[in-house]
Amino acid sequence: MSSKWWVIVAVILILGAGYFYIQSLQNKPISSPQPTTAPIVSPQESSPSADQTQKNIITITAGGFSPAEITIKAEDSVTWVNSDSNDHQVNSGPHPIHTGYQPLNTVGLIKTGESKSLTFPTTGTYKYHDHLNPQLTGEVTVE
Ligand SMILES: [Cu+2]
């Protein structure tokens, strides 16, 4: 009677040990590819902070301001970059009295290759132009 009972226990133990042995064999090939896939997955997104300083860029060329109209949020700044071979001068509209929005007059002359920024704290629409080429106009809308 008792010897039969021990045979059953022994069979269960052998099956159990075999189960865990097979499990350990199967786990090894599954876990080993992970170190090789992990470095491949990691992407190089290096410019979230660069975007913050590089946004709202207005390029000035002989053809004018690009984009000529820009919409920003209050407290955001706009940066004008002179990509032309000639100087340009940002002034508030209307030409030639420049009385629309005085802070735009502080931008003023931008030489070739230089850039200047202005922060707009208040909502509104602000017109400006290139005082050296008054036909070149632009507009900043602050929401
Ligand atoms: Cu002007």
Image (spheres, rainbow, N blue to C red):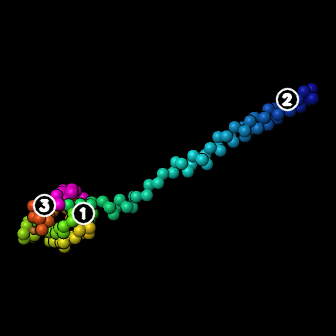
Task: Categorize mark 1 by other alpha carbons within 10 Å: few (<14), some (14-19), many (20+).
Answer: some
Q: Which residues are magenta?
A: 62-72
Q: Nearer the viewer, residue 82 or 116?
A: 82
Label 1, label 3: how many angstroms apart (C-alpha)? 15 Å
| Kind of residue indicated by mark 3 | Leu
**Quadrant, the N terminus:** top right
Q: Nearer the viewer, residue 19 or 9?
A: 19
Residue shown at 7% from the left, 67% from the top: 95
Local secondary structure at mark 1: loop
Task: Categorize mark 2 by other alpha carbons within 10 Å: few (<14), some (14-19), many (20+).
Answer: few
Check if residue 67 falls in the magenta segment. yes
For disc 3, the marked residue is 136
Q: Quadrant of ligand 1?
A: bottom left
Count of numbered circles in the view:
3
For disc 2, the marked residue is 8
Local secondary structure at mark 3: strand
Task: Say which mark, if any, is on residue 83.
Answer: 1
> Quarter-wise, where is residue 112 in the image?
bottom left
Check if residue 56 falls in the magenta segment. no
Place of residue 29 in the rendered image (x, y in percent of width and height, measured from the top left): 67, 40
Q: Is residue 86 above or below residue 13?
A: below
Question: In the rendered structure, which disc, 1 or 3, sits on the residue that comes first in sequence?
Answer: 1
Place of residue 43 in the rendered image (x, y in percent of width and height, measured from the top left): 48, 51
Residue shown at 26% from the left, 69% from the top: 114
